[in-house]
Image (cartoon, rainbow, N blue to C red):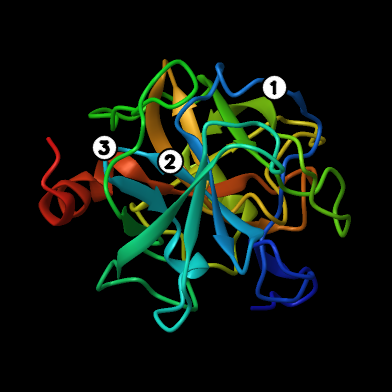
Amino acid sequence: MLAPVVAVVVLIGAAPTSAQVPHIVGGTNVSIELLPWQVSVQIGGKHFCGGSIISKSWVLTAAHCIRMYFSYRIRAGTANLRTGRLYDVIQKKIHERYNTVAFDCDVAILKIRGEFRLGKKVKIVPLATSRPQAGASVMVSGWGAMVEGGNTTNFLRATVVQVVSLSECRSCYFSEALTGNMVCAAVPAGGKDACQGDSGGPLVHGKKLVGVVSFGKGCARPYYPGVYADVVSLRSWITKNTGIK
């Protein structure tokens, strides 16, 4: 979708369009042991979006990443997209109230065949039960582009940003309808953010999942925080449809 001047992009892994979001800008390469819940959601053997392991069989990602007619696989246990273990997705579900224009309720769940082989490189991330306060440091990660309009990377990257209050975020996105199902994060001067290819990936605080990469205006632009699906407000839907607690 397009704002009056600045494109609002959702951070999926295909070539940039007006309906796409960003990847990790201003970050560093990280090992999978640091973020063992991070997975790559793949189509046709290629990275498409990020995701988070929330149980032995379920992955949480963004609704805008999922097309019901596509076949998906999950690559887990690696920071390098050329390695790791692949799992077939046998079930997918998008939040019923997902709004394709405003990106409200931008979450989806994917069930794999069998179970993840848990270990030091593959772990379940707990769902947060309370929202971090404005100013709290949170980490976002993924295989997305390192600069706006750039290419995705084969190596997992992460960066630390700060939670921005919803009221402040709304003042930045004055032309967009931000809802209580969203959480925002950024650094004041810009330069750190998610970007194309990072959609669906985790935003964590204290090793708990607080957000899912959703959309933003460009990548790491000053005055435009990244917008994430709020796991706390959407937690009841996630637990109801996966059976996790």
Snapshot quadrant of residue 173: bottom right
Mark-to-mark CA distance, 2 and 3: 9 Å
Snapshot quadrant of residue 161: top right
Element type at marker 3? loop
Q: Is residue 128 visible?
A: yes
Q: Is residue 103 visible?
A: no
Q: Residue at x 77, y 28 (%)?
A: 27
Amino acid type at image mark 2: Ser
**Which residue is tagged 1?**
30
Drawn side of residue 176 relative to residue 222, left or right: left
Name the N-terminal-most of marks 1 and 2. 1
Bin the neighbour count of mark 2 within 10 Å (Cα to Cα): few under 14, some 14-19, many 20 and up.
many
Amino acid type at image mark 3: Ser
Mark-to-mark CA distance, 3 and 1: 23 Å
**Which residue is tagged 3?**
55
Residue 185 location (% of width, % of height): 57, 36
From this view, report whether residue 27 is shown above or below residue 71: above
Residue 9 location (% of width, % of height): 68, 66
**Which residue is tagged 2?**
52
Amino acid type at image mark 1: Val
Tell me the tag on residue 129. Answer: none
From this view, report whether residue 20 is shown above or below residue 113: below
From this view, report whether residue 70 is shown above or below residue 16: below
Bin the neighbour count of mark 1 within 10 Å (Cα to Cα): few under 14, some 14-19, many 20 and up.
some
Q: Are marks 1 and 2 in contact (CB under 8 Å)?
A: no
Element type at marker 1? loop
Element type at marker 2? strand
Residue 194 location (% of width, % of height): 68, 44
